[in-house]
Amino acid sequence: MQDLFDINDPDDVWPETLGSGTTWIHGFLVAQAGQVMADIARVVAQAPYRHLSTPGGKRMSVAMSNCGTQGWVSDRAGYRYQTTDPHTAKPWPAMPPGLRALAQQAAKDSGYDGFEPGVCLINHYAPGARMGLHQDRDENNLTAPIVSFSLGLPATFIWGGWQRTGTTRRIMLRHGDAVVWGGEDRLRFHGVAPLKDGEHALTGRARINLTFRQIN
Ligand code: MD3
Ligand code: FE
């Protein structure tokens, strides 16, 4: 047997430059995906996925959890990072060291040495879940990149400019892809189109996205 595409072959990892500060590493974590899912399962056993409310009172279709020193939350009072999980009133679970190391490796491979992510937001998309166009600006440190990992079902990611209106680019983020977003691209508007239904061997009918952030 030969010439069959092997999704687990490390040679099937390749970088693509999306913008001056942004590198899409196709297949980056395919080989580690089982271990990553096991780490996520331990986190969400302690801090379950939940649908947060926007400041305007609308239920988000994406369910979220966090690990690390702080977690991103949203409620009537606004968006913020906080050290405790509002659902359990306990500190967020620690960031699994293997996950942190993998995020640091993706950053380094993309030219961001010294990335020290303290927090990881875990987004869970069921079919139909989406994320409207927004900027990530709740972090105090806007010079550090954000590293994102995608697992499970593919999703159409929407990448815009520095204003809400204007042209957007659509890319399909697949299982095992990492994207490192930084530099001048750090404040671009972005979102995720409604998740198309499907079944994935590792995640079932879901997509999971991790974002590693250096908030201070
Ligand atoms: C581009 N999550 O959690 S990750 C988010 O797939 C978020 O769940 C999406 O947007 C998801 O805030 C997209 C990719 C991402 C993350 C941060 C960015 C893209 C970005 C910051 C600036 C520009
Ligand atoms: Fe975002």
Image (cartoon, rainbow, N blue to C red):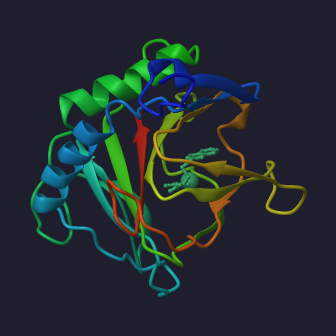
Q: Residue furthest front?
A: 1
* Residue at the (81%, 49%) spot, across then down: 161
Establish if 94 lies above or below 151: above
Query: In screen coordinates, is 24 left or right of 32?
Result: right
Establish if 2 lies above or below 162: above
Query: In screen coordinates, is 182 left or right of 113?
Result: right
Q: Residue furthest right?
A: 166
Quadrant of image for the C terminus: top left
Q: Nearer the viewer, residue 15 or 92?
A: 15
Residue 16's image quarter? top right
* Residue at the (33%, 59%) spot, across then down: 203
| Whether residue 112 is visible | no
Query: In screen coordinates, is 8 left or right of 195?
Result: left
Establish if 60 lies above or below 10: below
| Whether residue 62 is visible | yes
* Residue at the (27%, 68%) spot, across then down: 49
Q: Residue furthest bottom?
A: 57
Establish if 136 lies above or below 200: above
Q: Nearer the viewer, residue 143 or 157?
A: 157
Q: Position of residue 163 (x, y in %)?
A: 81, 55
Q: Nearer the viewer, residue 29 or 58?
A: 29
Residue 75's image quarter? bottom left
Q: Position of residue 150 (x, y in %)?
A: 47, 47
Give the number of callouts. 0
Q: Position of residue 121 (x, y in %)?
A: 37, 51
Q: Position of residue 115 (x, y in %)?
A: 43, 21
Q: Nearer the viewer, residue 193 or 8?
A: 8
